[in-house]
Image (cartoon, rainbow, N blue to C red):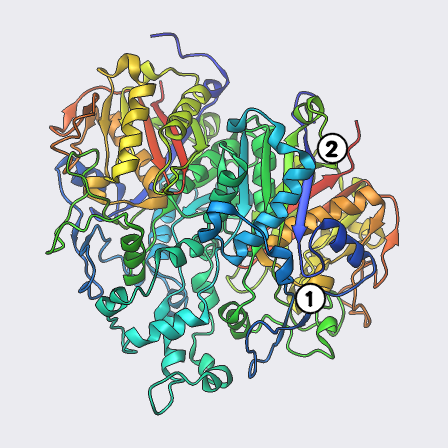
Amino acid sequence: MSPLRRRVVITGYGMVTPLGRNTQATFQRACQGESGIDYIRSFDTSGLPCRIGGKVDDSWIEINVGKLEKFASRGLKLMMVAAREAVEQSRLDEVPNREEIGVSLGCHGDNPPMEELTFLHRFYDGNGKWDVQGLLREGGYSYLQFFRRKPDVAAAMLSAAFDCRGSNLSIVSACAAGAQAIGEAFHLIREGGAVAMIAGGCEATLDFVGLVGFVLIKALAERYAAPQKASRPFDRRRCGFVLSEGAGALVLEELQHARSRGAPILGEILGYGDSADAYRITDTHPKGEGAILAMKKALDDGSLAPADVDYINAHGTSTLQNDAVETLAIKEVFGQRAKTIPVSSNKSMFGHTIAAAGAIECILTLAGIQRSIILPTINYEFPDPKCDLDYVPNVARHQEHRVALSNSFGFGGQNGCLCLGKFID
Amino acid sequence: MSDKGAGPVRDNPVVITGIGAVTALGHTAAETWNGLLSGKDGVQPIEGFDVLGFGCKVAAQVRGLDPEALGIHTKSARIMDAHSFMLMKCARDAFTKARLGGSSVAEDQIGFFVGMGMVDYKIEDLVPAVVASKGQDGVLDLEAFYFKGYEEIYPLIILLMLNNVSLCQAAIDLKIRGENAVFSPHADSGARAIAESLKTLAEGKAKVVLAGGVSEKISPFGLARAHLEGDLNTGGYDGVAVCRPFGAQRKGTILGEGCGILALELRASADERRVPYTTMITGCGDAFGCEESFSAPTCQAIAQAMRAALESAELSSSDIDVLIAQGDGNRVGDKNEISAIHEIFGNCLDRVLVFSSKGALGHLLAAAPAVDVIMSVSMLTEGVVPTTLHAAPVDESVKFHLVTDGPVRTSPKRLMVNCRSDSGQCASLIVETVR
């Protein structure tokens, strides 16, 4: 590493997940190996082959967003809750030069609600013809609904709410979006484009259209003894992922800047790597070439060797394909050492939060490093010969660790990997 | 003028070794450029769906870009849409032009960054399920919907809704495995894609990067959204409307379809690979600041982005010969951009020529900056600035030379490209002739 290279530390983080209203609550329950998955009660799921999800308690996101209220979709509220926690912890509001603070979020906007579809169908003849006049007359597609669908709204709203006038990024690479948003923010600070960035992701896709979309591609767990048992990464009986919602936000900051204002230093981002599978749109590369590349690049970026890594926070979705391929990729990168490195998947406890996953899992990894705790992979009961690593089964582990990777592999074949570390002077 | 031969961005600059553009004026960069030069107007009555009921009935649509002509299999085409076809075409053109075929550069050494317009669910894909669940009385039967109706939905609909799928498809087609990201949805996201590429190349994380942006497809719902957002020029009762960049009579923008992709690499790499180039990208800057109404960025934010771009290129505003402005005909946005241009070019307003492509190409959203950069390559090599279509009569507050009487012959060396969202993001880029 060049001695002059700017270091990027974390001075605040926050999250809201199916397990808890903030980082502390989520981490504590995750330590106990609890599950945040349950039957979906917010809409009727009768008839669907998958009727479970990881929902955030409504009371946790009852917040006052002032004049931004009219733009506040569920996704944005989740994002605001997470960002407030992070911003307060880092005392970001005390930084005078707001032009050097940016925002970088992974966010897809919200899905069309059923009410909208049932309203809209009245103006469609089923053969490609829309009664647009009738639609407009009845105010069918309001400006605000449009606003909620736009992927950049969350980033724009956070900038407005926290007065961040620097770079503003909205990243939409599916399940890798959160990790990529953090990675891009990290590079931006390292290269001098900003002194601090709010980075993270949010997802509020746990509605009918979101669920049906994943049901139709048969990606979700459909066979489960109980909702809490459905997400079982690396277990032989895994059969798909569980869809969840949530948000995670971090304040990344240039080290000297953080020091000079006495901000808390919670960890360091050491490297970031990304890649594309360039294989098939619906399948990951069978040999995990994209995943291997992303992990290697993250290590290179941090001038680290595979031998430096103490823990891997896996993408571990609980689909047959991902978990086997990810295992293969880890073995390729770490060789003989792979079996001695603890690998665990947070998704076993709160499911797959899509664009938020990279951010939430990055924070849990950092929190684990700080506390010398490695979170478990729950529901691990039946070993799969194809998945033969140390997945930290069912029980959290007390173990000091300093350097960790956090993997995120996006649908379509976009991959991101963050290399995180304990802050050492 | 001060000597601009020194400084880190100039030792080994990022040069443009490939381009691909699709707009209403043509399916190649050359066709678009020739169209702009000859004053052609890409804005036409909308085709493809019934516009009855819309206030704005015109747009700059891309026509005749069929998947068959691109050799895309019908099965693949089902999960693609106009934006995917445009991106595929431009990425291939830039790839070929930069001589990337035949494994001349390792797959994982080619990066790919794209600004993607709104990728919305297609309501037509969802509605059949609703229609199939109607009871005898014509009212939606929810039970029927939940138990059976939803199966009418095309199984891969999620792929049509995901914003990153088009990039992945083009990456699969061209075997691109390097650094990548998709930004969305406004013009600033296209500029962000280019800025990321500069960084990636400077850090040595890729040898070549494809970068640019693609607009959304013009659809009834895209049009309805833009219309309800208050962005569009609805012209009048007959719906005949034009986009008037900085025009005194501007009433809003006109949507356009298009895509622009650049192949970028460091000069040393281009020399080593013996790929020709004429133009380099030397600066980029961005900022955020939004009007209370969420209708446009503030003047301060636009100026901040322009200033940051100049700083990163180690230039001052008097070094810039041509500004390709956003100028999208938005009342507030154009007003703020006029003030920002006055502020930044205050001491040299008489020497900078200002142009906007929006009058002819419509508002290409995420594709706009890349297409403007591609047009700037031609401006620099051919020494001419086209006319800003439909701008005259120009807003009386404008103190700079907006080219409305062109094409103007000149010999520009350095250009600035401006772009912005309507939610407050702005970005600027600097493009120069390689000396």
For the residue marked with disc 1, what is the amino acid? Ser
Nearer the camera: disc 2 or disc 1: 2
Q: Position of residue B68 (x, y in %)?
A: 30, 63
Q: Where is residue A247 in the image (x, y as percent from the top left)?
A: 61, 53
How many tags in the picture?
A: 2
**Can residue B204 be seen in the rendering of this structure?**
no
Q: Residue at x 32, y 20 (%)?
A: B343
- Of all chains, the one bearing label 2 is A
Other-residue count near label 1 (Cα within 10 Å), few / some / many at <14 / 14–19 / ≥20: many
Q: Residue at x 81, y 40 (%)?
A: A402
Other-residue count near label 2 (Cα within 10 Å), few / some / many at <14 / 14–19 / ≥20: some
- Name the side, left or right, on which A417 lies relative to B139: right
Q: Which circle's residue, 2 or 1, is located before the other in the chain?
A: 2
Element assignment for label 2: loop
- Name the side, left or right, on which A165 lies relative to A404: left
B384 lies above or below A42: above
Asked if badges 2 and 1 are on one and the same chain, I answer yes
- Name the side, left or right, on which B29 lies relative to A409: left
Q: Where is residue A184 in the image (x, y as percent from the top left)?
A: 56, 39
Q: Position of residue A199 (x, y in %)?
A: 59, 42
From the image, which quarter does the N terminus of chain B lie in? Answer: top left
Q: Residue A264 carries which label?
A: 2
- Of all chains, the one bearing label 1 is A
Q: Residue A318 carries which label?
A: 1
